Image: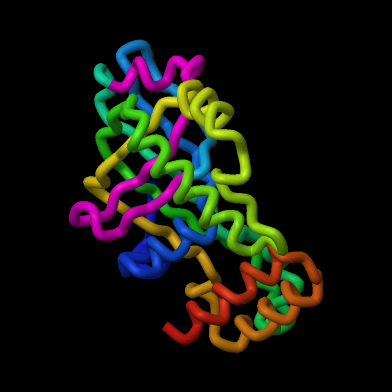
Amino acid sequence: MYIPKHFEETRPEVLHGLMRSHPFATLVVLGADGLIVNHLPMLLDPAAGPFGTLRCHVARANPLWKALPGAVQAMAIFQGPDSYISPSWYPTKREHGKAVPTWNYAVVHAQGQPRAVDDRAWLFAHVSEMAALHEASQPVPWKIADAPPDFIDSMVAAIVGIEMPLSQVSGKWKMSQNRPAVDKPAIVAALEAQGTDRARGTAALVKQAAKD
């Protein structure tokens, strides 16, 4: 990934924060027969290894897990907030007209060597953790104990886990850091006026980048 210095993000807590807040990642694996791409919700264990470890699961029918022993490398791509940025928002554009459209975005690339985990205890603990995490905000959180044990056993038997200790994590926060200071509040105001979660998320990151 091309990362100009002013857009580079290296702080582990910031990188991990985006991975947690936007856990649905694109997993790209370089297998013996070429690239394999899947879109999967990920769990991050930041304490496992120097850069953390990602865990997820796939259907047993998915050929990905059988390709992992021959895989050279893999990358999980986490996409944060992104928005179109119009040059008409810039006060400086009205002064000299020297401005063009662009796109603001935040993204994390996490690399590692994945392995398949075909172990019932591991899988049960994994899906329990995933359910607890994503059900926490529900008015009546669902838990594995709500379903019959034999049904859960059959569901767990139908999946295979993937664990990927991370060897490298890089981040790109393109959030108008290269714009003059006078343009940044105008960018934030225009994004917030759109009223969408996506635009508000981008506005929040533009604000934070202006402070860092």
Identity of the residue drawn at 57% across and 54% down: 134
Identity of the residue drawn at 77% across and 65% down: 196
Quarter occupied by the C terminus: bottom left
Identity of the residue drawn at 50% across and 21% down: 158
Is 204 displayed left or right of 174 in the figure?
Answer: right
Numbered disc total: 0
Residue 202 drawn at (x, y percent):
62, 68
Q: Which residues are magenta?
A: 42-68
**Image height of 72 relative to 123, above or below:** above
Residue 69 drawn at (x, y percent):
25, 19
Is 131 displayed left or right of 1 in the figure?
Answer: right
Instruction: Choose between 160 and 32: the one closer to the eye.
Output: 160
Q: Residue furthest left?
A: 50
Identity of the residue drawn at 32% across and 37% down: 163
Instruction: Choose between 4 and 40: the one closer to the eye.
Output: 40
Could you say which quadrant of the image residue 45 lies in? bottom left
Residue 133 colored in magenta in the image: no
Q: Residue furthest right?
A: 194
Instruction: Choose between 57 and 146: the one closer to the eye.
Output: 146
Could you say which quadrant of the image residue 54 lies in? top left
